[in-house]
Image (cartoon, rainbow, N blue to C red):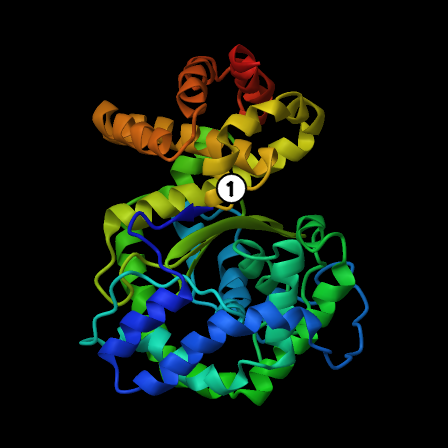
Amino acid sequence: MARSRRAARPLQAGVRKIAEKTRFPALLALVLVAAMVLPACRLSVQLPSVDTPQAVDGRGRPLADYEDRLLRKLARAVADPSLPPAERVVVSASPKVELVFIAAGLAGDWYFTSRVPSNDPRLSLQRSAAAHFASHQTHHAVSALAGLRLRHGFWYDALPHLALSFSDPPSFEQVYPISAYLAGRARGDGAVLRELGVRLRDLALEAGFATWWELHETDYQAIEDDWRAVIAAADPLGNLEAYFGRRLGALVIIPSGLVACGFGGSIDDPEGTWAVACIGPADPGSPPDADFLEFMIYHEGGHSFVNPLADDHADLVSRYQKLYEPISTEMGAQAYSTWTIALNEHVLRACHARICLATKGETEAEEMLAADEARGFRYVRTLFEKLAEYEADRDTYPEFGCFYPQLLSALDRYL
């Protein structure tokens, strides 16, 4: 997960700025007060019961059969396995992801950008969502999500991961099983996440989400078009596949108009693994910052190549567990709350800096490393230097996973 390099602000600070620039200061002030007060008392709220859906074993129908904007675009992209990397990049705003971010905003913490101008309709998405959904602050979906956050830390990247398990509202039908990672973020309780899916479906219906989305669909289309123009000038999937030595079915880029941070992950589908980068732009509505988008796409897309290796080598990863203690404060402040998560970030950032070295040169790679070190990634330079061995002997290490144990051995010096 990577945050915008421009400071992201919580809901309380963001709403203050928004209220100053809109005609709805009283309404947004009410949202602000509720955001500060309600989370503390939600743990005692008695939620209405819902029928717990049965767990699904896997996607039950063809991708195009779901009422889902993203899955239908994916169906076209993966229909031909011979497509080059540039044609396997899918850019699609996602109603289901925005619904979950809206519920998170109502639950008390929403990462806004630091500037919210008012001269472009696309810049009103945050304000519009706050106004449209304010009266549903106490909906049981919001209370359930707030409880999961307060009890278990179910937040940040867990939110878009959850959304991707379902189809778009209003049906919000479960498409994929609740992954072990997601269940783990809820302390192993996949049933409560399936119930949360039912509650989010109820929120979408009762709050008129479809009406809100229809009102802004052209705004999201404009954001997609802007981002495609930036991505067309690069080859992010091709460069990632070349560096890590593994082919992915697709790179899915989900632009959000509601948050200013990024989340990476993957969808494991019968037709292949798809890297996912869910990204809120640095300044929503402004022309995309090409450097910002490129940074986020490489970082979030790279998670699909890096993260599974820590699970495959869990015993080896645990050997270095004590290296988390010296960096725990800095990592925890950035939501990297365990050694495995922090290690994945170190490895990914080291790889990203190597790609930057090859594509942009030593100066920019050094700037990237220095920025990461300033944020507390103490071991990133050591890993960066070790990766030179991987690059120099791709015959022995055709795939990054083959080199992973050797890469971690560079951390022995810190034991």
Residue at which label 1 appears:
332
Check the picture and name the quadrant holding the C terminus: top right
Q: Residue at x 31, y 72 (%)?
A: 16
Badge 1: residue crowd in 10 Å (few <14, some 14–19, many ≥20): few
Residue 245 image point, x, y percent: 50, 30
Q: Quadrant of residue 257?
A: bottom left
Is 322 or 4 nearer to us in this picture?
A: 322
Q: Is residue 60 visible?
A: no
Q: Is residue 156 left or right of residue 20?
A: right
Seen at 35% across and 56% down, the residue is 8
Asked if residue 242 can be seen in this view, the reply is: yes
* Rendering quarter of residue 159: bottom right
Secondary structure at numbered mark 1: helix
Query: Which quarter of the figure has residue 71?
Result: bottom right
> From the viewer's perspective, is residue 147 above or below residue 354?
below
Amino acid tagged 1:
Gly
Residue 32 on image: x %, y %? 41, 75
